[in-house]
Amino acid sequence: MNETLHVSSQFDEDLARLRTHVLQMGGVVETQISAAIEAYSSGEVASVKTIVETDRRINQLERSIDEDCAHIIAQRQPAASDLRLVLGISKIVTDLERTGDEAKKIAKSVRRIYEAGHQPTQYGIGIRHLAEAVLALVRRSLDAFARQDAAQAIEVIRADQDVDLEFKSIIRQLITHMMEDPRTITTSLEIMAISRAIERIGDHAKNICEQVIYVVEGRDIRHDKEAIK
């Protein structure tokens, strides 16, 4: 193998390793979201400590991947699609880290609700349905990244619009609860915070998919609503 091919092979290995690390980080984030959703339904507030500790691991993964991206740019000087991949990954891991933050917020709100002696599931609103829909978006966004599938990325972006509508419906229901019974205000505000965090996770899944489209097609659709119609 001549030196050029050897360097090229090493570069391909670097990029493959970088993609693998992103997916590993995504897997940790998925687990964290699932744990937060389960805590909401079950009241197992002991899991909150684990979720918070997992968030620290996610932060470490973000820093490590960012360092890898900087190293590749400095050492390999990638161009065209390879450069887009590295730049896209640097933004995707930021969204994954922020997703982890939102899962931590959910878990802490859940703990406050149950420790106050309340049962959020008694409110009869679709928090769990919303959360499971958003978790599916996160999984599909990571799958779109793994497959470099721009078409699937577009589908996820469109599906996030349904999440936004469902979120607004939940907020209206909570406002009604508070108006009808002021004793529910404290818990309703916590559930609002939970639903807002879930909605933000959907936004981060959408952002990941916008980066997938940028990596695959070279198009920046972040502020182009016409691109997803």
Image (cartoon, grey):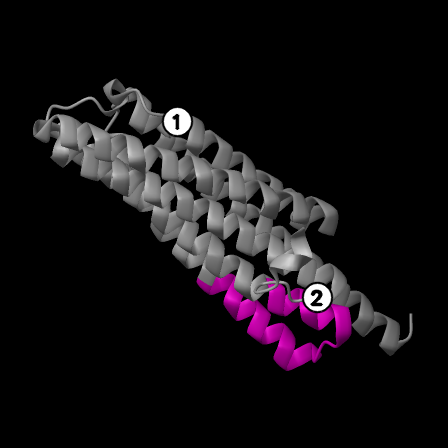
The question of residue 66 being in magenta is answered with yes
Q: Is residue 20 above or below residue 169?
A: below
Q: Mark 2 — residue?
A: 219
Residue extent of the magenta highlight: 63-88
Kind of residue sitting beneath label 1:
Arg
Q: Is residue 57 above or below residue 67?
A: above
Position of residue 227 relative to residue 167, above or below, is below
Q: Position of residue 31 (x, y in %)?
A: 45, 36
Task: Tell me the amino acid under the disc marked 2.
Answer: Arg
- Residue at x-position 68% and y-position 65%: 85
Q: Nearer the viewer, residue 78 or 193?
A: 193
Residue toward you, 83 or 124: 124
Asked if residue 27 can be seen in this view, the reply is: yes
In the image, is residue 178 above or below residue 203? above
Name the residue: 63% across, 63% down: 221
Answer whether residue 110 is visible to the viewer in this image. no
Q: Are marks 2 and 1 in contact (CB under 8 Å)?
A: no
Q: Position of residue 88 (x, y in %)?
A: 61, 64
The quarter of the picture where residue 18 lies is bottom right
Q: Nearer the viewer, residue 34 or 19?
A: 34
Report the predominant secondary structure element of the magenta stretch: helix
**Which residue in the rendered view is the most extreme toward the right?**
1
Asked whether 98 falls inside the magenta stretch, the response is no
Q: Tell me the number on the disc at residue 128.
A: 1
**The N terminus: image quadrant:** bottom right
Mark 2–mark 1 distance (CA, rounded to whole Å): 34 Å
Q: In percent of the image, x 39 and y 26: which residue is there?
A: 128
Describe residue 185's horizontal placement relative to residue 156 as left or right. Answer: left
x, y (%) of residue 98? 41, 54
